Amino acid sequence: MTTSIQAWLERYAESHQHPTNKRIHHICVPLIFMTLVGFLYNLNITFALIISLLAGLFYGRLGIRPLLIFLILVAISVAITKTLTISNPILLLMFILAWIGQFIGHRIEGVKPSFMEDLQFLLIGPLWVFARFLR
């Protein structure tokens, strides 16, 4: 049985209650997403497309809106990293700094990150940040 998008978001939200942690996530999750997509597309377009397809299958199982949000985020991420010609070392630095921010947020929250319970939460984070578009 597939877990509904609402159930995923509710479970994710349980460990994201503190206002500062929420703000940090609203900055760091999109940065992590963008830098990861940019890095993969800079590295090898075929591999990036395969990874995007696999992630797209996960989002597609959750519904058309989650899939559309994912596709839009991928397109924006590629556009930003290609237009600004952000190199892999810079993307890696941004990725690491954003993850440090995430862990600081969870330290403030006083709970471990959701993905330590279930790796699929790594895919839910971007949807949680943009949940207002799922309604």
Image (tube, helix red, strand yellow):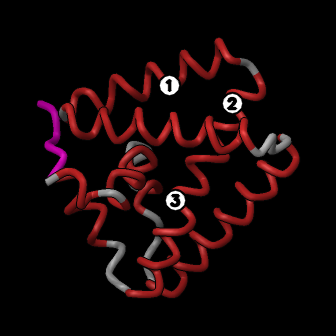
Is residue 4 within the magenta segment? Answer: yes
Q: Which kind of residue does numbered mark 2 sit on?
A: Leu
Is residue 108 within the magenta segment? Answer: no
Q: Which kind of residue does numbered mark 3 sit on?
A: Val
Q: Does residue 28 appear to the left or right of 124 in the view shown? A: right
The residue singled out by tag 2 in the image is: 40
Which residues lie in the magenta part?
A: 1-6
Q: If you read the primary sequence from the N terminus, does the residue marked by circle 1 or circle 2 appear first?
A: 2
Q: Which kind of residue does numbered mark 1 sit on?
A: Ser
Mark 1 to mark 2: distance in Å? Answer: 10 Å
Count residues near mark 1 (Cα–Cα under 10 Å), then give few for <14, some for 14-19, many for 20+: some
Q: If you read the primary sequence from the N terminus, does the residue marked by circle 3 or circle 1 appear first?
A: 3
Count residues near mark 2 (Cα–Cα under 10 Å), then give few for <14, some for 14-19, many for 20+: some
Q: Does residue 92 appear to the left or right of 98 in the view shown? A: right
Image quadrant where residue 46 sits? top right
Q: Going 20% across and 62% down the picture, which residue do you hit? A: 10
The residue singled out by tag 3 in the image is: 29
As drawn, 17 above or below 117? below
